[in-house]
Amino acid sequence: PFRVGVLAIQGGFAEHIAAVKRQGGVSVAEVRTPEDLANVDAIILPGGESTAIGHGLVDADLLGPLRDFVKSKPAWGICAGLIMLADALDDGATSGAIESSAQKRQPLVGGLDITVKRNAFGRQIDSAFRTFELCSDVSVGNQAYFIRAPAIIETGDDVEVLARLGADAPAHLAGAAVAVKQGQLLATCFHPEISSDDSWLQMFLSDVCKAQTAPLEPPPRVEAV
Ligand code: GLN
């Protein structure tokens, strides 16, 4: 079956493993080493603490392999996982060369053309179960926990916004994108796994992963002129 990896360096990976186990037709594996990564078809990057996950990836020699993986294979980043997939943070960190001083502060995987502000919702007390507005007609839940969540403050032209905060959000975040998709990459600021809402996982498996594993169409024939 299709093998879903869950990055198990730090953070809330257990809930995602349980969620994948609830689905049919897929198997799940914890990913802690480059060998683990080589054996999965897609990866979930769970929430947690993105600096700890980033340094853990460097220590496990996984940062380079993961950067290569997300260039062609499906990945879903949740909260800290979304931060890992971002091409840039608003503090100047980028997914560029590991040698740069920004990278020493916070290693990123990158791949998703977004700029992210960490801990954008304010203090811990501002972590909450929130409702958001779906921008596309996919059938996914529109409520989830936001835990010391990041905000997406810029999205590139190739990034599709799947959900935005409504007018009831903190004023500085009203209308901000909270779920995005770019090719084989999905990222959410919120945690559907905490409320056992499998709809986002099912959308990841059925839309994002399936699109990547579908057989390629033969190239169109070019008529001679
Ligand atoms: N605040 C965390 C960070 O910046 C993310 C929190 C989460 O993943 N729930 O890494």
Image: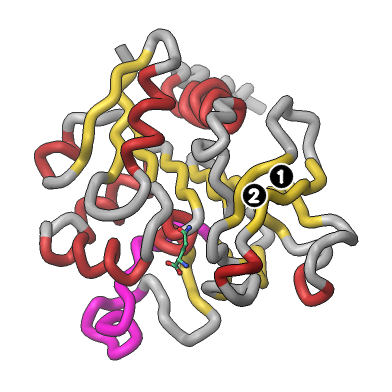
Tell me the amino acid under the disc marked 1: Leu
- First in sequence: mark 2 vs mark 1: 1
Who's the residue at 61% across and 48% down the image? Answer: 145
Q: Could one spot residue 76 in this view of the protein?
A: yes
Give x and y (percent) for residue 84: 40, 61
Examine the rendered structure and indicate whether residue 122 appears above or below residue 76: below
Q: Give the range drawn in magenta.
A: 96-112
Examine the rendered structure and indicate whether residue 26 appears above or below residue 114: above
Residue 179's mark? 2
Residue 141 found in image quarter = top right
Circles 2 and 1, Cβ within 8 Å, touching? The answer is yes
Question: Which quarter of the rendering shows the C terminus?
Answer: top right
Residue farthest right in this picture: 167
Q: Nearer the viewer, residue 159 or 20?
A: 20
Give x and y (percent) for residue 113: 55, 62
Give x and y (percent) for residue 174: 82, 66
Distance between the alpha carbons at the discs numbered 2 and 1: 5 Å
